[in-house]
Amino acid sequence: MNAQLKYVVDELKALYPKKDYNIIEFDGFEPDQLVQILSNVICTIESKEAVNTRSENREMTIKRLLNSLYIMKYRPPSGNEYDLAQSLFLGEKSAILPLLEWLLKERPTLEKRAYLGRYLIKIEVPPALRGDSNLEELFENYEQLLETFKDAHREREQHLSAGSNTGELRGDLAVMEREREIVVAKVATLQKTRVEGSKANAALLARVKALRESRAKRDMLLEQKARLQTTCVEMERFVARTKQQVAEARRAAHGVTPQGLLQRAEEEEKVSTYIANEKIPADMKSGQTQLQLLREVASQTCLTRSDLAQVEQQVRALSSEVNALLERRMAAADPADDKLTPFKQQAAMLGRKKEAAAEALGELKKESAALKSKLEKIQGQLMPGEELPLTEEQFKKYMGQLKPRTELFKAKRSQLSSQTAECGVLSRTLEILRSNHELAQRQLGDEERRLGLSGYSSTASQLAEVNATKTELDLQKESKLEALSKTILELNQIIASKKAKLAPAIQELRPLREQYQASLADFNKLKQVYDATAANLGSASNKIEQEIKQIEEETRQAASEAALFGAKTEVVDAQKEVLVQEMAFYKSGDKSKSLRERLNAKIAEEEKRGRHLKEAQRAMKDSEPANERQTMLWENVERIFAAKLRHVTTARRDSGVFRRERGAETLVILN
């Protein structure tokens, strides 16, 4: 753990030199700080700007980090991504430290993966939307662009790997330059000896030009042929698909009458009308309701257990109230409504069946679109020359052709069974003959032992086998010796011819080898001079770069100082304009428009307003005792009337009923 922590801190120091991390400080970081560091490292690998996790929603942060780790192909040690997400949400150090170590160790590879993942992760398109021709064409263009990007990236990597060794390239270029000079010299020699010295010079050049043009034309025709072959294959596929669609349309139209077509169109129109007018609005309404509920839930704060208990209590109270209202409604129901209840139930059942049928129809349409896209994908993956899957008519034709083959197979199988039985009889006969042979051999051995010649027959058979083997080996030896001598003669002839051919080349090679040795010595000297010059130029360029950086820094500081001076100048100019206006007002005698007079007027107005407020406060303080006494008197009157009301209510409940008529009160005694 300490080694891991030390490695992470050292790598972070190298990655962020401006931030001075140490082991003790890093070990005491809070979970939020660890998540922020992890987010910064991932953003650096992805070449993005750092995101402040404190201002970002925690769930969005975890989702963004998990998405980046998925692109980088990170596998959690536990193998469970849910545990990783929970650990990142809580900011556990035991999960973040190994993750930081892996990111920092594999940073070059992960930068490449992040760069490629930004462009190569495909956009998921639902199967229900793949039926749209415009969207399908756009998606195909998108896939073609992805393939183009892959090819371009592959070529770039090849160029980078090929151009990694500059020294080897320079050596190859020098060798190629020397070879070019040699070839140019040979071409000039041949041109002088064979072309310019020949009588048919113009004719030969014309023939060579015609040959070059014919070869260029042949290459162009071959390219055109390849393009036409590709176009023909695509057109054959298109024709096959069209034929299949026509056959399906004919099968679908077989036995169809105009009345049937009209009825089918009416049914489809009814289904479409129901879906457009009833199902889709209902689904949209339910979706909007659910979305509104989710927004309300998301906008609310996190509920505690006491809040949940309170909500459950409210739900139970509302449920009991709803049940009571339903019972009251059923008790006060009209008998005419009871007669309509079965019809209402039937209508509700039909509505549910209609909704279920519409949902099943939608699922079938999605499945059909998915199958069509899968079929088109399989047809597009067929190589040139491959056949399309069999249609129903082709399959029936194939079954018709298969019947005579089946009969032939049955006849051959019966012949095979008879031959198998015959083979069994022959194998049994062979076993009997072997047993008779063994019996005869035993009898022969007994007879040889009786005569004192035991082993005679076996020795004779072995001698015969040895003689046959010796004869065969002698024949093979003779044939091999003849072949070997013939091969040696051929090799000697080939070697002699090759030596004769190579003799002039060897003679030409000797001066070239001497030239090569001399050129190699010159090359080594020039290389030393070049290396020394390159080192001097490199140090000089580094020094110049440092001076340029210093000058740029001074330029930036001067620009910032100039901008600050400009801002101060603008402030001074504004103050100067105000002073000029004030002086003009004072000189003109119209002091009412000057800034000083306006400020004095505002000050006087505020002072006057303050005096009015103080007078109002003083008046309120003076009237406070009278107001308090008035309030107390009104409270006493209110208590008197309340006591009188209680007394009247008690007397009415105990002895009778008061009646107030025309300003008089009458007590009616109840017996």
Image: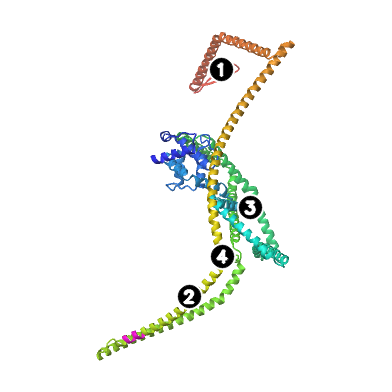
Magenta run includes residue 469: no
Marks 4 and 1 close (CB-CB < 8 Å):
no
**Residue at x 30% of width, y 89% of height:** 444
C-alpha separation, residue under disc 4 versus residue under disc 2:
26 Å
Q: Which mark is residue 131?
A: none
Q: Is residue 198 left or right of residue 483?
A: right
Q: Which residue is mark 2?
A: 488
**Quarter of the image holding residue 551?**
top right
Q: Residues within 10 Å of mark 3 (few under 14, many from 20)?
A: few
Q: From which residue to which does the magenta span run?
A: 459-464
Query: Which quarter shows the N terminus?
Result: top left
Between the residue at mark 3 and the residue at mark 4, the CA separation in whole angstroms equals 58 Å
Q: Quadrant of residue 616?
A: top right
Which of 344/262 is in front?
262
Q: Label 4 belongs to which residue?
A: 505
Disc 2 marks a residue whose amino acid type is Ile
Badge 2 density bin: few <14, some 14–19, many ≥20, Cα 10 Å: few
Say whether disc 3 or disc 4 marks the residue closer to the N-terminus: 3
Disc 1 versus disc 3: nearer the observer: 3
Q: Residues within 10 Å of mark 1 (few under 14, many from 20)?
A: few
Lower sequence index among marks 1 and 2 = 2
